Image: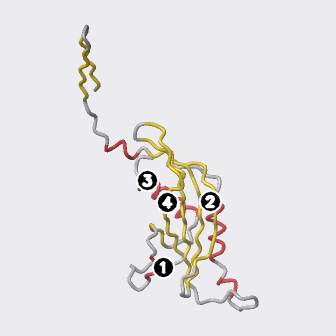
Amino acid sequence: MEHWQDLYIELAERISEKLPEIQWIDLWHNQVGFLAEEHPFGTPAVFIGFRSAQINDIGELVQIVDLQVDFYLYYETFLDTFKGAYNQEGALEFTKSLDALFGNFHGTSGRNYSSMRRIAFAPVDTGTAGNLYQVTFECKLNDSSAMKYYEPTQVHLQVEDEDNRYFVEVD
């Protein structure tokens, strides 16, 4: 992976292709907590967040990242989920998207990641009529994004002892 936006676009495109019911896909920045201030968005919506779990250097400017990918599925509804509710079927419609997120990402690899697996699943209290679930996956990626900023340097070193003079050049 050379660019973080490539990973985001790959995941967003997969959601768009495999979960056609999703009306909005965006990077996560707690939009649900600030609905009055945010740009309006349709639901169901999926927001994507990234955080590292572990990072290991494998070479100059390249790292293997154990990446946590949080998918936040938000569905706003005033329908009722309680047993016997006349509109329960519609209220539970978003649970199909939860299943589809799991089914379409668990065990996958892509152009910018590998070994995706679900590691957590939990509801998030919104204090509103919206349902918000966080589905967390972990994957591995080879992050070479620092290489595009690398500026080669030249080093000239002169080493002397009483008998010899040595010049070492590194380009």
Which sits earlier in the primary sequence, circle 3 or circle 1?
Answer: 3
| Circles 2, 3 touching at the beta carbon (< 8 Å) | no
Q: Residues within 10 Å of mark 1 (few under 14, many from 20)?
A: some
Dot 4 corresponds to which residue?
51
Alpha carbons under labels 2 and 4: distance apart:
20 Å
In the displayed structure, does residue 44 sit left or right of residue 30?
Answer: right
Above or below: residue 86 compared with residue 44: below
Of the residues tagged 3 and 1, which is closer to the observer?
A: 1
Alpha carbons under labels 2 and 3: distance apart:
18 Å
Of the residues tagged 1 and 2, which is closer to the observer?
A: 1
Q: Quadrant of the C terminus?
A: top left
Above or below: residue 121 compared with residue 86: above
Residue 48, horizontal then vertical, whole percent:
50, 65
Which sits earlier in the primary sequence, circle 1 or circle 2?
Answer: 1
Q: Residues within 10 Å of mark 4 (few under 14, many from 20)?
A: few
Dot 1 corresponds to which residue?
32
Q: Quadrant of residue 90?
A: bottom right
Which sits earlier in the primary sequence, circle 2 or circle 4?
Answer: 4
Q: At 63% across and 56% down in the image, what residue appears? A: 117
In the displayed structure, does residue 10 sit left or right of residue 87?
Answer: left
Above or below: residue 89 compared with residue 22: below
Q: Amino acid at mark 2?
A: Asn
In the displayed structure, does residue 170 sit left or right of residue 92?
Answer: left
| Circles 3, 1 touching at the beta carbon (< 8 Å) | no
Q: Amino acid at mark 3?
A: Asp
Q: Amino acid at mark 1?
A: Val
Alpha carbons under labels 4 and 3: distance apart:
16 Å
- Please tell me whether mark 3 sits on a helix, a strand or a loop: helix
- Please tell me whether mark 2 sits on a helix, a strand or a loop: helix
Circle on res. 53? none
Dot 2 corresponds to which residue?
104
